[in-house]
Amino acid sequence: MYRDKLSKVNYESTFSKEHLERLKPGDKITCYDFSRIYSKLINELDGDITAVMILQGMNEGHALAGFYTDNVSATVEAINVDSDKDSTNDLMKAKNGIKLKGIKTISDRAGIIEQSIDKVYPQVLGKQPKSIKEYIQELKSIPQEQDVPDDVVLKLQSLLEVMKANNISGNEFVQTLWGVSKTKYFGDTKLEQAFLGELQKDKDGNERYKRHILLRQPKQEKGQNFSREVYLIDTDTLDLTTCFDQDIIARLNSGELIYESEKHKLPGIDKEVI
């Protein structure tokens, strides 16, 4: 995410047996990791099935996996954000019980793949999956209790507790938050949002950026010029920090925080120009 901002690039997509063997449930993975592991698992199955890794652009591009038998062939990718233009990938869908979009049939005259997927869903989820539209509608239909205070911090804390209980973090949390933002969970006004990176160094001196979501309520009155409350969420730990815009500006000035994109910033929160 912040590769072009690091002084020492340590991200590589070349094969590393040691890296793949160290991965365990809950670890962050790339499309390259997923494709390697998926292909290996499929090739270890009994029967006449072969899986391959597919690179788009060689080491600098996207990676996915494919498999084929005498009867079917398909491609599979879990980190497919643009697969159906809903800003969610299959890792997010799987964790929220939504029907997957990353399994794309190339050849299947007998409809074997679709039948197999439909059979597996209830075995894994314990129920039939939802579509992304049904998921959003389900969120919108949650009853709004009249005695629940209109408190953004309380609502964020409640949402984060649910995410933690369902082991949803990182990019999957960001995408789930996108779904929640399509409802009136936070009220009639839409929270302003931007992404920040926090520079950190490991014991070997290697740099990395930790991703945060910066949220703020829109101005309620014209002409407000006082410091406004903002909410900073660590997308990995889901820790919530409440502070003020001046606190974020100070951390931007020190270089501790940077915006992920120069095109997407919260108005009034930026490095001071000297």
Image: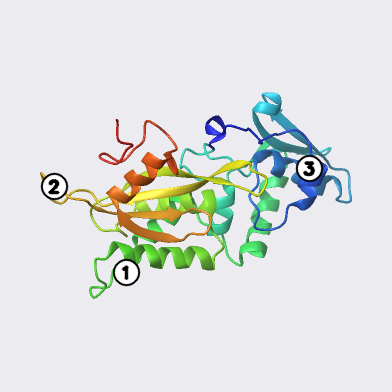
Q: Mark 3: few, some, or many residues within 10 Å (few <14, many ≥20)?
A: many
Instruction: Pinpoint residue 185: horizontal percent, then vertical percent.
Output: 32, 60
Image point 81% across, 46% down: which residue? 18
Image point 85% across, 50% down: which residue? 45
Tell how many labels.
Answer: 3
* Residue at which label 3 appears: 39
Instruction: Pinpoint residue 179: horizontal percent, then vertical percent.
Output: 41, 52
Identify the residue at the far front of this view.
274
- Residue 50, quarter of picture: top right
- The three-letter amino acid code for the residue at tag 1 is Pro
- The three-letter amino acid code for the residue at tag 3 is Ser
Q: For the residues marked 2 and 3, what is the alpha-carbon distance in whole angstroms?
A: 56 Å
Quarter of the figure that contains the N terminus: top right
Residue depth check, mark 2 versus mark 3: number of the one nearer the observer: 2
Instruction: Pinpoint residue 202: horizontal percent, then vertical percent.
Output: 63, 48
Residue depth check, mark 1 versus mark 3: number of the one nearer the observer: 3
* Residue at which label 2 appears: 224
* Residue at which label 1 appears: 143
- The three-letter amino acid code for the residue at tag 2 is Gln
Q: For the residues marked 1 and 3, what is the alpha-carbon distance in whole angstroms?
A: 44 Å
Which numbered disc, 2 or 1, marks the residue that appears first in the sequence?
A: 1
Q: Mark 1: few, some, or many residues within 10 Å (few <14, many ≥20)?
A: few
- Element carrying mark 2: loop
